[in-house]
Image (cartoon, rainbow, N blue to C red):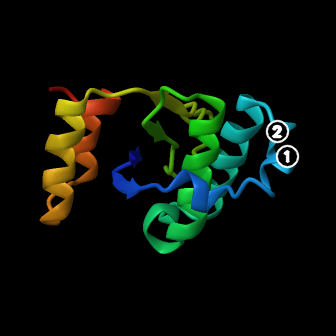
Amino acid sequence: MLFLLNETILDLNLRALIPPAEAPKFAGLSFDQVMQQGADMFRQNPLLATEDVTRAKRLAALIVVKAPKANAAFFDTAAPQPGKRPRPPQVVSISIEVMATLYGEFLVGKLTPELAHRKVWSLLPA
């Protein structure tokens, strides 16, 4: 399964990332707790999706477990600014066509934050 995490596409194998023996320890987590954990992880390391791929994949897998139709998540990586609240995390299901377009760009190293923001996160004008 392909999953867009900010501007990085991860190829997830859910069974390998959350083995059945470990599933019970995640069952008690709510969707909001998973999203808060993800926000905290990205605040600690804005490049999490590329610098710690294993943790990023595990986060994405937890998101999918809690929101099975989701295939994309965004976590704000901007440095905190006085008087400005960070963007809340977003989770969406993007179409196969959009994912295919983004994946093609990702494979050739051309998936930029700007392109992901335009196509998925609506952070920049189309």
Asked if the residues shown at circle 2 and circle 1 are in contact, with their CB atoms under 8 angstroms apart, the answer is yes
Q: What is the number of the mark on residue 11?
A: none
| Residue at image point 60% right, 64% down | 55
Q: Quadrant of the C terminus?
A: top left
Q: Is residue 42 visible?
A: no
| Residue at image point 70% right, 58% down | 19
SS type, badge 1: helix
- Could you classify mark 2 by the number of other residues whose Cα lies within 10 Å: few (under 14), some (14-19), or many (20 or more)? few
Q: Residue 109's image quarter?
A: bottom left
| Residue at image point 78% right, 49% down | 23
**Residue 38: horizontal and vertical position, in percent?**
64, 48
Callout 1 amino acid: Pro
**Residue 112: horizontal and vertical position, in percent?**
22, 54
Q: Nearer the viewer, residue 112 or 22?
A: 22
Instruction: Identify whether 1 is placed above or below 27.
Output: below
Q: CA distance from mark 2 to mark 1?
A: 5 Å
**Residue 122: horizontal and vertical position, in percent?**
30, 26
Q: Is residue 119 visible?
A: yes
Count of marks, rendered view:
2
**6 relative to 20 in the view: left or right:** left
**Residue 74: horizontal and vertical position, in percent?**
47, 40
Instruction: Identify whether 79 is placed above or below 100.
Output: below
| Residue at image point 24% right, 39% down | 99
Residue pointed to by mark 1: 24
Residue pointed to by mark 2: 27
Instruction: Identify whether 118 is placed above or below 46.
Output: above
Callout 2 amino acid: Ala
